[in-house]
Amino acid sequence: MEKYCRRDINFMYLLENSPIPDHSTFARFRSLHFAPCAERILAEMTECLRATGEISGDAIFIDGTKIEACANKYTFVWKKAVTKNLEKLLVKLADLVANCEELYGIKIIYNDKVKMKHIKKLRKKLYALKYERNIEFVHGSGKRKMPLQRSIETLEEYLDKLKEYTQKLHICGNRNSYSKTDNDSTFMRMKEDAMGNGQLKAGYNVQHGVDSEYIVWLTVCDQPTDTPTLIPFLKSMEESLSFKYLKIVADAGYESEENYLFIEENGQLSFIKPANYEISKTRKYQRDISRIDNMDYDEIGDYYICKNNKKLIFSKTIKRKSKTGYISEKTVYTCEDCSSCSYKSKCIKGNNSKTPLEERAKNLETSKLFNKLRKKI
């Protein structure tokens, strides 16, 4: 913006010979003044477009794009790695407490469980021993450290690491990663470059809702996939706008049982492309006898029939919890007899070293609700 004010004749005209603002002035205005009211301005603009008949207000087309954050490439913090390091650190702290109890004849742990209060108590007792014995800490090469100094320094080092790991996990929250130079950004797979290399960079997932070629609503998400962003997008739009879109149109990246159910319960119609739509038209997919889509289903008896005319009967129901907290119910079907089946090698996929293929039976796991909603779409 500052560069345009110096070089672009249109910006110079708008300035009317006023001093050229610095780039930090633009940034300060954007963060302090524009950001708090940006959502309200967008809502007012959308309401104005609807009042003038520029948008239909009937169908909204939703899609997302990943925008790279202004953060360095190698500043990632991975939640999984931090969790593993934290577990190792807690084991080291427990060993240090046991070692100090043996070395200095102090008793802190009574129920074989090391808690944070025990660590703080140990710290106080070690410093009390230092002042009782009048020990002066030494530093530098050629100077021998006392065992008490080593214990205190090790404990302080572990406590600093514990604070660091706890802070990193707090910043991560529900995400799997973040950047040290931009804590709000998440590392996600960007679109491939010209050489076909997928880049893992810090960025944001920006969701747009388009109606009659206008962006009528927009949200910025930290989720690397589009599926969990749809419900927050619709809720945010519904809270800010005075009208509600009847038709929700999106691509296959938004398909899930949770999204289908939310749209239906919200009194809206979903036009979401099924994730298997393109692949289901291929000859390889249609000839794959292991897939549930290529088996006949009997609704009255609630069983599937495989290529060998064997029944896959109801076995059990299990519940699965998604990252968003949604609990879906899965139904498991098991073949009544898979022994001496000539199609077994093509029907049962995957390697199981514990159970040989001859002893394994065909299992299918499916969600009846999801199948019903997908068929309806």
Image: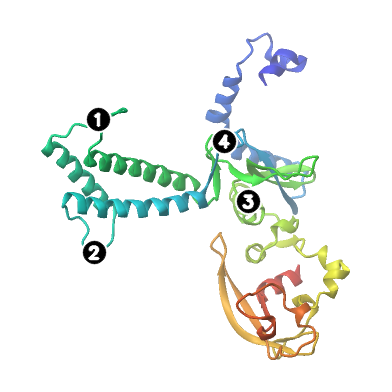
Q: Earlier in the sequence, mark 3 or mark 1?
A: 1
Q: Which residue is tagged 3?
A: 233
Residue under numbered circle 4: 37
Check contact, mark 2 vs mark 3: CB within 8 A: no
The reply to whether the C-beta atoms of the residues labelled 1 and 2 are less than 8 Å apart is: no
Please identify the quarter of the rendering in which residue 127 is found.
top left
Residue 369, image quadrant: bottom right
Q: Is residue 122 above or below residue 347?
A: above
Judging from the image, what secondary structure is the residue with disc 1 in? loop
The residue shown at (22%, 58%) is 109
Rounded to the nearest angstrom, the CA distance separating label 4 from label 2 is 55 Å
Q: Which residue is mark 1?
A: 138
Residue type at tag 1: Val
211 vs 266: above or below: above
Tag of residue 70: none
Q: From where the camera sits, is residue 117 visible?
A: no
Tell which tag, 1 or 2, sits nearer the viewer. 1
| Quarter of the image that includes the C terminus | bottom right
Residue 112 in the image, given as x and y percentages of width and height: 26, 63
* Residue 113 % position (x, y): 28, 61
Of circles 4 and 3, the one toward us is 3
Q: Nearer the viewer, mark 4 or mark 2?
A: 2
State the image coordinates of residue 32 (x, y, percent, origin top left).
52, 29
Q: Which marked residue is nearer to the observer: mark 3 or mark 1? A: 1
- Disc 2 marks which residue? 111
Sequence-wise first label, 4 or 1: 4
Q: Is residue 212 rendered to the left or right of residue 183? A: right
Amino acid carrying label 4: it is: Cys
